[in-house]
Amino acid sequence: MFLILVIMIISQNTLKWVMRFYPPLFFQRIWVKKFDNDFRSCTVKLSKSLLNKNYNGSIFGGTIYAATDPFYALLFDQLMQRRGFKVRVWLKSASIQYLKPARSHVYFTITLTDEMIAEAEEALKQVGKFVKAYPMEIKTQNGELCATVMNEVYIRNLHQGETPRVAY
């Protein structure tokens, strides 16, 4: 059910609530705070809890990694669909650098700039696909940097050949 909703054009508020209760995120305490500026930005909170705490009392690294997975793809998917593209978007690869233990709640915000969107749109028109890595910083409420992540997004223009499917 959730995957079907995500690939359609939906409101920012609807997607926020769908993602909040999507089981892989919900049970790891990954909470979408908001989608802003017509899907140009997303803020996420990762709450430290008994469900995601490791043996040394910090947030399990896999939970931090999982928290970063869907959001660049979701933002690009919603933006490109609103611009008239029929697209398939997914996270092609990712890498993470843990800089210090996350001993409290952590946060991150992703923002897509006009330049990022224009670059993707141009590639979709010219080549039919777009692949690029983007950075993320995972910080505590006090601004301490706990991890950096690089997410490589893959976007395919389905108007140029691939048959659409309901789920990825």
Image: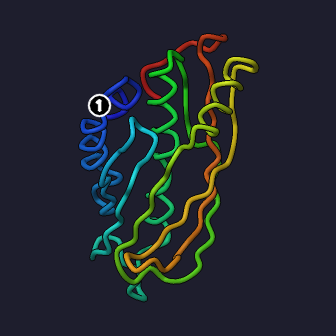
Determine the image quadrant of residue 46.
Answer: bottom left
**Above or below — where is 145 with respect to 12?**
below
Identify the residue at horizontal 68%, vertical 17% (top origin): 125
Query: Percent position (x, y) of residue 153?
Result: 62, 41
Secondary structure under the numbered disc 1 in the rendered image: loop
Foreground of the two, 56 or 105: 105
**Above or below — where is 48 with respect to 67?**
below
64 horizontally vs 45: left or right: right
Determine the image quadrant of residue 129.
Answer: top right
**Above or below — where is 55 with respect to 151?**
below
Determine the image quadrant of residue 28.
Answer: bottom left
Identify the residue at horizontal 49%, vertical 56% (top origin): 68
Quadrant of the image containing the N terminus: top left
Identify the amino acid type marked 1: Ser
Query: Percent position (x, y) of residue 45?
Result: 34, 63
Identify the residue at horizontal 32%, vertical 28% (top origin): 5
**Above or below — where is 31 with respect to 133?**
below
User: Which coloring applies here?
Assistant: rainbow
- Say which residue label 1 marks: 11
